Image (cartoon, rainbow, N blue to C red):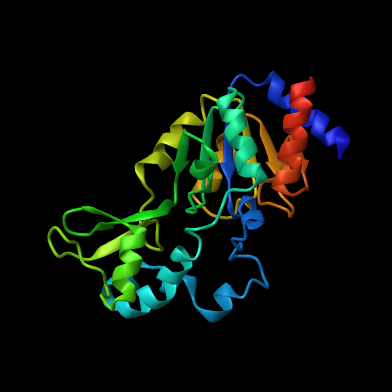
Amino acid sequence: MEDQIQRAVQCIKESKGIMVLTGAGISTESGIPDFRSPGTGLWEKMDPMEALSTKTLLNHPEKFYRQGFQILTSMKDALPNTAHRVLAKMEEEGIVDLLVTQNIDNLHQKAGSKKVYEVHGHVRSGSCLECEEEMLLDKMENKVADGEIPPRCEHCGGIVRPNVVMFGDALPPCFDMAMDAIRKYDLLIVIGSSLEVGPVNYLAYLCKKLMIINLGPTAYDSRANLIIRQKAGEALTSIYEALKKA
């Protein structure tokens, strides 16, 4: 493992621009389960494509806000872990240029990262389907608890939906920005992602060099210049400390 850490340090030092892509695996150390992993039990109780879809929100709002919405509210109080904090330091010190995340948990921002593209949205708030007025997630949660399902916009009375990318939604503009940006950087570091979810995984195809930090295999292992099979927090701490000594 020490040899891989040294190779990672060398790769980072040789790079003129670095993008980081994070997935669910980086947040498991904060107590947020990777719902795609077997044994978490989350999707054994509900079908994600149904529970978290725009179709269910509009046609069966009670089901959406009693099931899918609970997944979102369950992560709002989570705290960033070592991996999030190290990435924030690396950004602050000019090591990492851009962070792209598939996660909706807001943990990168809580850790202090500034330049974050949330390609699957976030759990901080929702917005009205009619006038796009924003509503904080806490307020949405209170309305649901009071029996207001779906929660209604206080400006126009329209239905308020969470600001997350649900099944059937288009990706936000920051995804196109990430696709444009990857051509500027010569290293992509993927952390905690199996790279199975498209089209975000296409970043791993477009990048010049690819480093993967993930406990399990990924769909792009054959393209990787370096693979580190270690927990995100442990690997990033070792890399950061080695960079300071280099």
Q: Quadrant of residue 140?
A: bottom left
Q: Is residue 13 above or below residue 53?
A: above
Q: Which quadrant is home to the N terminus?
A: top right
Residue 114 in sight from this viewpoint? yes
List x then y, in percent, for residue 62.
32, 79
Q: Which quadrant is home to the C terminus?
A: top right
Q: Is residue 52 above or below residue 23?
A: below
What residue lies at 71% left-to-right and 45% top-to-bottom?
233
List x then y, in percent, for residue 97.
54, 27
Q: Is residue 158 left or right of residue 187?
A: left
Q: Is residue 125 left or right of residue 158?
A: right
Residue 54 in sight from this viewpoint? no
Name the one closer to the observer, 81 or 2: 81
Q: Is residue 202 left or right of residue 70?
A: right
Name the one closer to the observer, 143 or 10: 143
What residue lies at 14% left-to-right and 65% top-to-bottom?
157
List x then y, in percent, for residue 118.
45, 45
Name the one closer to the observer, 187 or 127: 127
What residue lies at 27% left-to-right and 75% top-to-bottom?
149
Q: Is residue 79 above or below residue 83?
A: below
Q: Is residue 19 left or right of residue 119?
A: right
List x then y, in percent, for residue 99.
53, 36
Name the one closer to the observer, 151 or 15: 151
Mark count: 0
What residue lies at 51% left-to-right and 52% top-to-bottom?
103
